Amino acid sequence: MALTNVLLLSQIAGYIIGLILSLCIIVPMGMHQNEFGGHCLLFSRGTWQEEDGQLLVKWATTAYCNYVMVVGFMMFIVCCIQVYRLSMFMYKGLDSSFLSAFIEAVACVTFCGLAVSAAVMVTLGFMTWCQNIVERFPSCEDATGQDIDKMDKISTHGFYIELGTAQFGAWGAFATWVGLAVFSTLKVCRYHQLENIQVSMYRERQRLVNENNGRSTPPIESLSN
């Protein structure tokens, strides 16, 4: 029971952290797209114009930003459900079944893949954008608040901290889901171990019952006498 409580508390804490980190992905990415007029800077490239010093941007597809946000939304929903569900288990002194624990382990591994793909996408996409920015500015952060693309009417006042926060949230979420996958796998292994113990005890009990029945039955010769 003590091990069950530790795993359950660890899972609840992990899902709460995952819930917070999912907001660190959703909110800044939404703010970024709003400030950039619906454009997504991930993997976007541009050319600096000599005559006016503006950046002529060849915008990448918004699917990159949309994918990251969808992953964040999925994490948010699952974490909310799991925090409520596991809290009810803790309150009632219950625990999930073997099947639900197995499904949870598979889901955690799946979210590990989604989280790392979103994290890599944000990191590489942001690096691609910053490679254009540093052609004119000493660092990517120095372009914050600068009018580098008046034609598209984008606002650069918060893009650096917004993408940095989303990047932190994505990598943090990946680490959190790895931990949750470990916890859920440990729970599945524990259920499997308990099942093996129960099977072994049942077989031993049957063996003892059969031995006792054999001893209590009198020999045939004695019955005939």
Image (cartoon, rainbow, N blue to C red):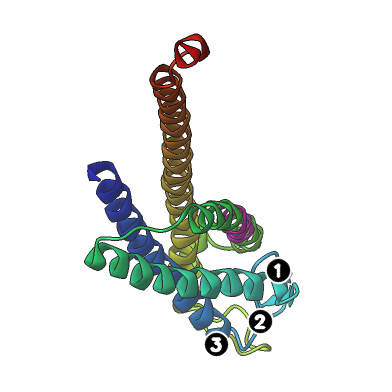
Question: Which mark's residue is nearer the viewer, 1 or 3?
Answer: 3
Q: Amino acid at mark 3?
A: Asn
- Give the alpha-carbon distance from disc 1 to disc 3, as whole Å: 16 Å
Secondary structure at badge 2 equals loop
State whether residue 178 appears in this view: yes
Secondary structure at badge 1 equals loop
Q: Main secondary structure of the magenta part?
A: helix
Which residue in the protein does label 3 denote?
A: 34
**CB-based contact (under 8 Å), mark 1 and mark 2:** yes
Which residue in the protein does label 2 denote?
A: 39
Residue 40 screen position, x and y as percent:
65, 76
Which residue in the protein does label 1 denote?
A: 44
Q: Is residue 164 magenta?
A: no
State the residue in front, 52 or 124: 124
Pick whichever of labels 1 and 2 is earlier in the sequence.
2
Q: Amino acid at mark 1?
A: Ser
Residue 196 is labelled as none
Q: Amino acid at mark 2?
A: His
Residue drawn at (59%, 61%) of the image: 122
Residue 24 screen position, x and y as percent:
42, 69
Residue 135 screen position, x and y as percent:
63, 59
- Give the alpha-carbon distance from disc 1 to disc 2, as whole Å: 9 Å
